[in-house]
Image (cartoon, rainbow, N blue to C red):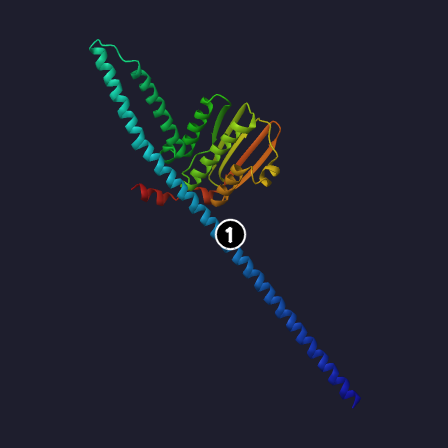
């Protein structure tokens, strides 16, 4: 009888152990499934946020392009027409040997200044070169304009054989350069700024903006909600196109490097050819 009781107790213990093991295994499976589900949902949410950010940027650029065209085709043409009318009036008075009213040359000068300003604003909103000749030409024009302002010297170097970029990649890199040059002008106290644009069929496209200014504390600027908006915008722009941004800053050298891998940077040549046709 004792033997039977011991065997029964052993069987009950073994059964309980099996039940406990199976329960632990089920709990582990459920936990792992829940973790995988959370990771999947997190990745899906992150992808949706990136897509939303990308669409917001595209909408902004479309509106910028619309305003630029309106300024160029509307306001700019009106100013040109008024300028031609005044020039015609001045020439007519000179042919008739009549004195030109002092106000006319002043008005003509004001019109010229306004025309230059409207064209400058139009170009900054959406440079036509970016869509017609590509990123290198647009950046060279941007550097020329920055240099003409005279406060800081600027240079640019292009490496590798350029390939056609996705429209959003061109826009993001151009806006990043604009923001970087604005920061150099306002805060860096630099003597020189250099832009390097490099193309590689396998690695993708790389853009670096560096200056010899006083530098800044990157971490402190990023943590301060009142500062560093431009830097956060740069990082978000790069993340929205599948690229990455690396910033380094010390006294005497600050660099902002943007890298977009080839799979994200290169335009679909077949689609581009179809749209052109």
Question: Which quadrant: the N terminus?
Answer: bottom right
> Can residue 166 be seen?
no
Residue receiving disc 1? 46
Determine the residue positioned at 41% across, 43% down.
58
Is residue 173 shown above or below 10?
above
The location of residue 262, given as percent across then percent down, is: 47, 42
Residue 71 appears left or right of 97: right
The location of residue 159, given as percent across then percent down, is: 48, 31
Q: Nearer the viewer, residue 53 or 88?
A: 88
Determine the residue positioned at 40% across, 40% down.
61
The location of residue 207, given as percent across then percent down, is: 50, 35
Q: Nearer the viewer, residue 263 or 63?
A: 63
| Label 1 Cα neighbours within 10 Å, binned few <14 / some 14-19 / many ≥20 | few
Determine the residue positioned at 71% across, 78% down.
14
Is residue 39 shown above or below 220?
below
Determine the residue positioned at 49% across, 42% down.
238
């Amino acid at each position: 009888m004792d033997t039977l009781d011991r065997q029964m107790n052993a069987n009950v213990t073994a059964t309980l152990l099996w039940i406990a093991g199976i329960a632990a295994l089920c709990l582990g499976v459920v936990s792992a499934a829940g973790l995988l589900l959370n990771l999947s949902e997190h990745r899906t949410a992150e992808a949706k946020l990136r897509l939303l950010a990308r669409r917001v940027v595209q909408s902004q650029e479309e509106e910028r392009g619309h305003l630029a065209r309106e300024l160029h085709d509307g306001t700019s043409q009106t100013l040109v027409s008024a300028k031609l009318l005044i020039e015609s009036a001045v020439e007519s008075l000179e042919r008739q040997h009549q004195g030109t009213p002092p106000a006319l040359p002043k008005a003509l000068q004001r019109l010229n200044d306004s025309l230059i300003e409207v064209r400058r604003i139009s170009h900054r909103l959406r440079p036509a070169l970016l869509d017609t000749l590509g990123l290198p030409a647009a950046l060279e024009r941007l550097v020329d304009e920055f240099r003409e302002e005279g406060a800081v010297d600027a240079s640019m170097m292009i490496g590798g054989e350029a390939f056609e970029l996705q429209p959003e990649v061109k826009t993001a890199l151009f806006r990043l350069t604009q923001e970087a040059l604005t920061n150099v002008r306002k805060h860096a106290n630099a003597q020189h700024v250099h832009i390097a644009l490099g193309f590689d069929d396998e690695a993708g496209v790389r853009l670096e903006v560096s200056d010899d200014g006083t530098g800044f504390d990157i971490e402190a600027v990023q943590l301060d909600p009142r500062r560093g908006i431009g830097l956060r915008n740069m990082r978000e722009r790069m993340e929205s196109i599948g690229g990455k941004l690396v910033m380094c800053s010390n006294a005497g050298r600050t660099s902002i490097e943007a890298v977009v891998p080839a799979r994200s940077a290169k335009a679909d040549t077949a689609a581009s050819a179809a749209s052109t046709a």
